[in-house]
Image (cartoon, helix red, strand yellow):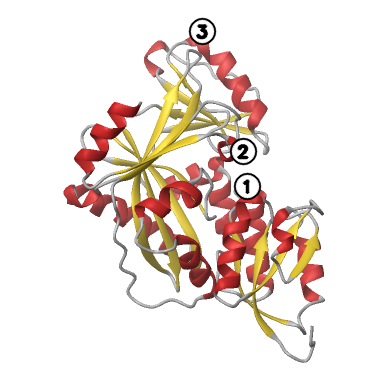
Amino acid sequence: MNKNVIKDALICLAAGKSQVPIILAAKRLNYSVIAIDINPHAPGFEFADHSIIHSTHDAKGVIKILDLLNDQFNWLGILNRSSGPAVLTAAKISQHFCIPGVPIKSAKILLNKDAMREACSKYEFPAPSYKLLKKNEVPNLNDDDYPIVIKPALSIIGKSGISIVRNKKELVKAVTYASEHTINEMVVLEKYIPGSDISFISFVENGRVYSVCYLNEINSEDMKGRVYGKGFKTYDIDNNHNLKEKVNAVVDKIVKSLEIMRSPLMVSFRSDNEGNVFLLEVHLDLGGDLLIEKLFPNALDLDFTELAVNMASGNINHPIKIQVSPSAVFFEDGSELVSEKDCNTFAASTFKELEDLIVEKQ
């Protein structure tokens, strides 16, 4: 490499199988990619311009190594598909290199469900009533407090450690289950709200939200009340303008209140039977759950990976217009990691046809 030529580069946090499509998209768009992974055999290293073997959870160490490359690369943005501590690393890298991103304080709030619940009260984001518990703490509840949801305040694997609890007999096991999956010593108790789960997929650039699509999240519950993600389907929210306006208003308020300048943004809501929306989770990464690999190629009329790369670099055209088609992905039983499960995909001409197809195939 000619060290006299400074190249525009993107920093990719992790270089595993899930990151390969994003790295390849960046290369197609002529960006240099610096990939970071603790695994020296990570498959993404094969396609990166520069490989750093280091933990993505160690922001200080990563920044120290990146500083040594300042004379070779012009840091444009960060590609992160990993939830958990890598989100905080991304925020710290952004601050250090003056890349538009998410304030460290805001990343901490959204990363930890306990801190996010407190932020919901502070900023008046609509959310289920909640109580914060220490790890393995069993609360004293009345019979009319049920049903409730018990979940880890911070976990590595999505949907892990979550249970719906309907009586006192199930409580201890649910708390233990959540405690086994939390990595910040806290557990969240929430009031259970009947309804459907909606995920809003978007990006933020210069503090402005750019919508990609709305999804229905399909979850299942086993005999122990444990919740598992079963899949996603595109949601025709344009036929419910009131719900769309409510979701968009909350998302805009989150971005403004927490001063998010540039980031992927996936926001999960529970919509009750009266059409009210309640904030459940906010993700600042590109997401897993086979959305990039299986759902988006059928659902969107553009390459989501290239959109993600351009958004990360700040190189976008305004406005973004995306046509969303009726599509779904359903996961088969297997590994706790969705990325390691088999799946079925569905594509249809209309949303009614999609529903009929799902019923027929399931």
**Closest to the observer, 206 or 47:** 47
Mark 3 is on which residue type? Lys
Of callouts 3 and 2, the N-terminal one? 2
* Foreground disc of the pair 1, 3: 1
Residue located 63% across and 69% down the image: 94
Q: Name the side, left or right, on which 234 lies relative to 295.
A: left
Q: Quadrant of residue 154?
A: top right
Residue 202, image x, y percentages? 41, 59
Give the quarter of the figure containing the N terminus.
bottom right
Mark 1 is on which residue type? Gly
Compute the Cα span from label 1 to label 2. Answer: 7 Å
Residue 277, image x, y percentages? 30, 42
- SS for dot 2: loop
Q: Is residue 92 visible?
A: yes
- SS for dot 1: loop
Residue located 46% across and 67% down the image: 307
**Closest to the observer, 47 or 288:** 47
Q: Which mark is residue 155?
A: 2
Residue 206, image x, y percentages? 45, 74
Q: Residue furthest bottom?
A: 4
- SS for dot 3: helix
Q: Name the side, left or right, on which 296 lies relative to 245.
A: right
Compute the Cα span from label 1 to label 3. Answer: 31 Å
Residue position marked by numbered label 3 in the rendering: 169
Q: Is residue 260 visible?
A: no
Residue located 63% across and 47% down the image: 84
Circle 1: is it few (<14), some (14-19), or many (20+) Cα within 10 Å? many
Circle 2: is it few (<14), some (14-19), or many (20+) Cα within 10 Å? many
Residue position marked by numbered label 1 in the rendering: 84
User: How many marks overall?
Assistant: 3
